[in-house]
Image (tube, rainbow, N blue to C red):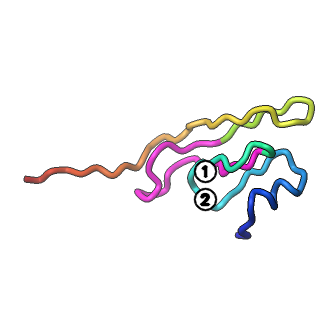
Amino acid sequence: YAPCSPADLAGRGYDYWALGHVHDYAEIGRDPWIVFPGNLQGRSVRECGPKGAVAVEVRDGRVIAVRRLIVDQARWAVVEVDLA
């Protein structure tokens, strides 16, 4: 992957960046939108919590809203159990 800054991406003139490699959801910026959508399903116990996709609403050729959709069917969790 190629590390870059939000300023580098914003300077390219795109309205929306969907970044990959990172499996967790994160909004890095909103002008323009810079989003790690994450993955649809946790792949191991190292990927706990809700997973999903991103719906992007476009009007008149411009991104006006971004909404996270939780679509996972199973979740990994770490649970401590007292065996005393």
The disc labelled 1 sits on which kind of residue? Gly
Q: Is residue 3 above or below residue 23?
A: below
Mark 1, residue position:
38
Mark 2, residue position:
22
The image quadrant of residue 53 is top right
Q: Residue at x 49, y 42 (%)?
A: 50
- Label 2 secondary element: loop
Q: Is residue 63 above or below residue 28?
A: above
Frontmost residue, 35 versus 43: 35
Magenta highlight on residue 34: yes
**Cβ atoms under marks 2 and 1 closer than 8 Å:** yes
Frontmost residue, 14 versus 47: 14
* Main secondary structure type of the part rendered in magenta: loop
Residue 21 appears at what percent x and percent y?
Answer: 64, 61
Q: Residue at x 87, y 50 (%)?
A: 14
Tell me: 38 left or right of 45: right
Considering every residue shown, the one lying at the far left of the view is 84
Considering every residue shown, the one lying at the far top of the view is 59
- Label 1 secondary element: loop
Q: Residue at x 48, y 40 (%)?
A: 73
Image: magenta residue range: 33-53
The image quadrant of residue 66 is top right
Tell me: 12 left or right of 79: right
Q: Residue at x 57, y 55 (%)?
A: 23
Residue 69 appears at what percent x and percent y?
Answer: 61, 36
Sequence order check: which comes first, mark 2 or mark 1? 2
